[in-house]
Image (spheres, grey):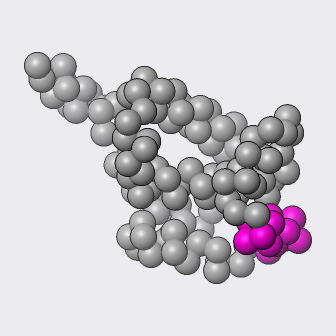
Amino acid sequence: MDTEKFLANLEQLKFGIFDTPEWNEICKRENKIGSEAVLEEILDKRLWTNAEIMWVVRRLLFHYGSRDKVLQKAPLERLMLNTAEILRVLYLIIDYTDPDLDDNFRAYICSKMTDAAWGVNESTRRYLMKRP
């Protein structure tokens, strides 16, 4: 399954947070006041609900996945820090929940993690060190 199809159908999967009243309320609020206003409201809070966390992740996927032109102007160091923060959150969630994933979902995650590991494994690090 390619990434675009997966993300396009993500909300139709009918599991977890997407079926909750909290998620539906955020989506209604987004339609009413706009995604930027909802994002600012969430970012101003100290603690977020699970639905708010997922909504922010969805926004991150949208901007990072679409190779947002504004984000391309961000300093590389900041983008690396953003990525590290997201990975820390993922690490905590996986460690805490130890989810029982079906093989298809696990294969998708493994495929994406393999792609994301480019530059981390020994052969690609050697390649990068040789570059001027």
Check the image and report above or below for 43 versus 26: above
> In this image, 11 relative to 81: left or right?
right
Residue 19: x and y, percent?
A: 79, 74
Q: Residue at x 34, y 31 (%)?
A: 120
Q: Is residue 21 magenta?
A: yes
In depth, the one of 35 and 94 nearer the eye is 35
Residue 112 visible in the shown view: no
Quarter of the figure with the N terminus: bottom left
Q: Which residues are magenta?
A: 17-32
Q: Residue at x 73, y 46 (%)?
A: 40
Nearest to the observer: residue 55 or residue 108:
55
Query: Relative to 10, is 127 above or below?
Result: above
**SS majority, magenta:** helix
- In the rendered image, residue 131 lying in the magenta stretch gets the answer no
Residue 75 picture quarter: top left
Q: Is residue 119 left or right of residue 40?
A: left
Residue 30, given in percent of the width and then of the height, sits at 74, 65
**x, y percent for residue 82:** 53, 33
Q: Position of residue 111 (x, y in %)?
A: 40, 56
